[in-house]
Image (spheres, helix red, strand yellow):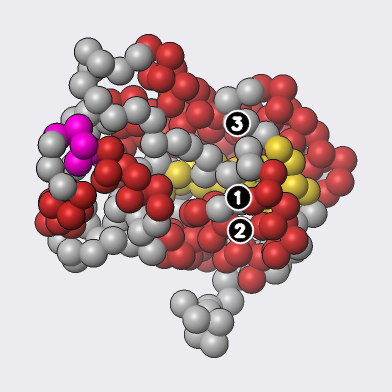
């Protein structure tokens, strides 16, 4: 949406929200969307330059270098949120990596573990530290970023697909566990998101299968009903909706934002 047509979402003004990997990409777009609605933001990222620039742009109250797979760094991030913001009302578990591209016999176990640690275990760790604060706030919302790979098998991307399927299980389990505390938990499943990360994934898959980048990109787009990539801002709009009171009766859901990806 343009600033002139942007809808005001109820309940976001003043709401304290943590966004992981908020320095760039989808995370930054989500932070911008929330800030535009008056939310108070805490960001973490592993890139100091990107994090500082994002924090300055949106006026984040907390900006912390944190690898979400590292419990001590995650604990430090949420400790700062408690100390400097007085608590938390929402969490967007956005941090993730593409992981390796290759056959199961070629992927190094260390690369498998790293992908699972960041894409899945990191979401657990952030929820582990965020949920007590959200409970003390009287309820709130968690948005976990999964992927279209969380509903399809994904040849040559097994660590990523396995992690993103795990995010769906984490989401549905936490929705059941935390409903009595008025904490809503949903997942967003982005598809082929326009930007450098997806271009890198396409390039790696093209190299692995021996076709050109253009041919591989056309193949990806042919599997989307709307025939186009999704801007990251579209994912951000849905995340803001889910954190807001407009989404107050949505929980345990996995919402694709992907132009209807038919297969991977």
- The stretch of residues the image draws in magenta is 205-209
Residue 68 shows which numbered tag?
3
Tag 2 near tag 1, CB within 8 Å:
yes
Residue 19 located left or right of residue 149: right
Q: Nearer the viewer, residue 250 or 16?
A: 16
Q: Secondary structure at mark 2?
A: helix
Residue that carries the numbered disc 1 in the rendered image: 22
Q: Secondary structure at mark 1?
A: loop
Residue 3 shows which numbered tag?
none
| Badge 1 or badge 3: first in the primary sequence | 1
Q: Nearer the viewer, residue 78 or 43?
A: 43
Mark 2 surroundings within 10 Å by alpha-carbon count, few (fewer than 14), some (14 through 19), many (20 or more):
many
Q: Residue 39, image x and y in percent?
A: 69, 62
Residue that carries the numbered disc 2 in the rendered image: 31
Q: Residue 49, image x and y in percent?
A: 68, 49
Label 2, label 3: how far apart the Cα atoms are: 17 Å
Residue 122 in view of the camera: yes
Residue 240 located left or right of residue 83: left
Q: Which quadrant of the view contains residue 83?
A: top right
Tag 1 near tag 3, CB within 8 Å:
no
């Amino acid at each position: 949406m343009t600033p002139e047509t942007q809808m005001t979402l109820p309940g976001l003004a003043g709401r304290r929200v943590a966004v992981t990997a908020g320095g760039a990409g989808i995370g930054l777009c989500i932070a911008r969307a929330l800030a535009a609605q008056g939310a108070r933001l805490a960001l973490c990222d592993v890139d100091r330059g990107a994090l500082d620039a994002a924090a300055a742009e949106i006026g984040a109250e907390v900006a912390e270098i944190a690898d979400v797979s590292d419990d001590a760094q995650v604990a430090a991030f949420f400790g700062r949120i408690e100390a400097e913001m007085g608590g938390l009302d929402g969490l967007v578990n956005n941090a993730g990596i593409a992981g390796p591209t290759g056959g199961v016999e070629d992927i190094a176990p260390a690369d498998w573990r790293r992908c699972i640690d960041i894409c899945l275990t990191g979401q657990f760790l952030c929820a582990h530290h965020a949920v007590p604060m959200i409970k003390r706030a009287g309820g709130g919302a968690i948005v976990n970023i999964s992927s279209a790979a969380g509903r399809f098998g994904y040849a040559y991307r097994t660590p990523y697909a396995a992690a993103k399927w795990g995010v769906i299980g984490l989401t549905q389990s936490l929705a059941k566990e935390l409903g009595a505390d008025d904490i809503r938990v949903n997942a967003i499943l982005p598809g082929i998101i326009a930007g450098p990360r997806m271009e890198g994934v396409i390039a790696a898959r093209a190299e692995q299968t021996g076709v050109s980048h253009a041919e591989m990109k056309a193949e990806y787009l042919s599997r989307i009903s709307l025939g186009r990539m999704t801007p990251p801002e579209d994912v951000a709009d849905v995340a803001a909706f889910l954190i807001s009171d407009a989404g107050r009766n949505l929980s345990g859901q996995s919402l694709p934002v992907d132009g209807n990806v038919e297969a991977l």
